[in-house]
Image: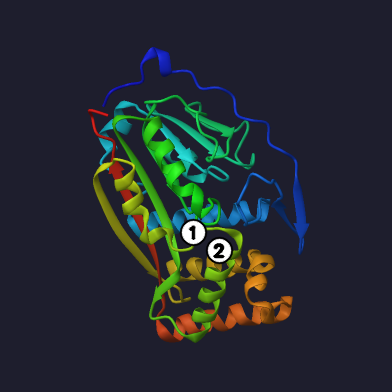
Amino acid sequence: METPTSSTSHITSGKTENSVDRYENGRRYTDRADVAYVLPIDEEENDRVHQQHWLIKLTFGGNFSAPITEDLEKGITVHDAGCGPGTWTLDMANAYPQSTFYGTDVSARFPKEIKPGNCHFQVHNLIDEGFFPENYFHFIHQRLLVLGILQNDWEKVIREHVRNLVPGGWLECSELAFYGAYNSGPNYAVLSDAWITMCEIKGLFAKIPDHLQQLFERAGLINIELKEGNGPMNPYSQYGRLASENFKEVFFALKPVIVLANPSLDANDKFLEFLESCLKEFTELGTRQKIYRVWGQKPFEA
């Protein structure tokens, strides 16, 4: 792959993170007007995201699907967009010491000192264009931002990623399809409807997994591929136990916004009881949650 030219090799410092947070049910959330993210940004959430990283890695059999292994081994520049606590970024930086990794997120949840020398983190909101130089990254990785990017901003974010890629570089996005699962039942349907309504209230794109391919195509990417992963949500395997625990923690953290869509669930005990009934239903029906991964290449002549 081509490397960045000298005129585009400088990366500027990120914006200072605004200390505008709110606390609800003992959890910390960002209250920045320019940030759509609705999940918590505290240590408890960081622990969940660390665990979720391994679930996704198990689901797809690796940290990425784009054909870039040889390039990573030789040494390329990579952007982990919306990196959270930096779990994927750190895992990849350790696995590919010849490559350089930049993780960005709207909050400074990532390590500031204890990290590999080839791993760098900055505060950055993906909706802010022009932060990184044109034709800089060889690989851009983004995942699970359905709750972090407004529906009207998705096309802009994807196009900015493409602008940042070198010709021949790859973009890869992964998103959970919370609104759909295999072998789901009535309790899941209640939660799925609340999820979609919540996203509509917040201006989020609930069904972005169904539209990633089209967004890639409209942004001019080629060699686009999609892979569906799915896994059990029951306690009969290590994967299922982790998936069930992740489900419960995600939706309990989302309680403040879920109850906006379904006020009948607005009580801690009742909400927890409902989530437990969902987990029981998953076990009885063999429910499997879906996740989609899409990757595509920037044309060499771009």
Q: Residue 87 location, x and y as percent? A: 51, 45
Residue type at tag 1: Phe
Secondary structure found at label 1: loop
Query: How is this picture coloured?
Result: rainbow
Q: On the rendered structure, is 95 left or right of 45?
A: left
Mark 1 surroundings within 10 Å by alpha-carbon count, few (fewer than 14), some (14 through 19), many (20 or more): many
Q: Which residue corresponds to the image point at 51% horizontal and 74% vertical from the top-left?
A: 192
Q: Quadrant of the N terminus?
A: top left
Q: Are marks 2 and 1 in contact (CB under 8 Å)?
A: yes
- Structural distance between the alpha carbons of marks 2 and 1: 6 Å
Mark 2 surroundings within 10 Å by alpha-carbon count, few (fewer than 14), some (14 through 19), many (20 or more): many
Above/below status of 65 relative to 284: above
Q: Which mark is residue 110?
A: none
Q: Which residue corresponds to the image point at 49% horizontal and 86% vertical from the top-left?
A: 186
Q: Residue 164 location, x and y as percent? A: 40, 31
Q: Which residue is mark 1?
A: 205
Residue type at tag 2: Cys
Q: Is residue 23 visible?
A: yes
The first of marks 2 and 1 along the sequence is 2
Q: Nearer the viewer, residue 113 or 42?
A: 42
Secondary structure found at label 2: helix
Q: On the rendered structure, is 200 left or right of 170?
A: right
Q: Which residue corresponds to the image point at 51% horizontal and 36% vertical from the top-left?
A: 103
Q: What is the number of callouts on the image?
A: 2
Q: Residue 223 location, x and y as percent? A: 22, 44
Q: Which residue is mark 2?
A: 199
Q: Quadrant of the C terminus?
A: top left
Q: Is residue 145 visible?
A: no
Above/below status of 163 relative to 67: above
